[in-house]
Amino acid sequence: MSEAVTFSPEQKRPALHKLIDALPAEELELVERVLARLEIDRVWKDVRQGFTQDWAEGKFVRLDEIIGEVRTDLEKRSA
């Protein structure tokens, strides 16, 4: 069995750019969607981590109370 060869990001970048440059135009949208999904996942992980830290620090202790107040106010305004 042969071992998998790993490349550094510096080596992968030019190879990936070359592959993308060689893609037919109709496949570029799919690549763009995959890259967008990866970015969304990365950003969401960062956001979740921030919220988790904020919850642990007690920054949202009054959140339920505040939401209740806003809902009550909205109900009064719409009546």
Image (cartoon, helix red, strand yellow):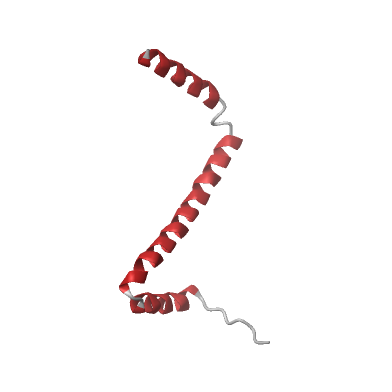
Q: Residue pushed farthest right? A: 1
User: Quarter holding the C terminus?
Assistant: top left
Image-quadrant location for residue 17: bottom left
x and y, in percent, of residue 66 in the image:
49, 22
Q: Vertical placement of 43 versus 3: above or below? A: above
The image quadrant that residue 13 belongs to is bottom left
Which residue: 57% across, 27% down? 61
Numbered disc total: 0
Quadrant, the N terminus? bottom right
Residue positioned 31% across, 72% down in the render: 25
Percent of width and height locating residue 44: 49, 49
Residue at the extreme left? 25
Residue 59, horizontal then vertical, whole percent = 54, 31
Q: Is residue 54 left or right of residue 73?
A: right
Relative to 56, residue 70 above or below: above
As drawn, 66 above or below 18:
above
Query: Foreground residue, 76 or 43?
Result: 76
x and y, in percent, of residue 72 in the image: 45, 16
1 to the left or right of 34: right
x 48%, y 73%: residue: 9
Name the one closer to the observer, 57 or 35. 35
The residue sitting at the front extreme is 26
- Where 47 sits versus 59, above or below? below
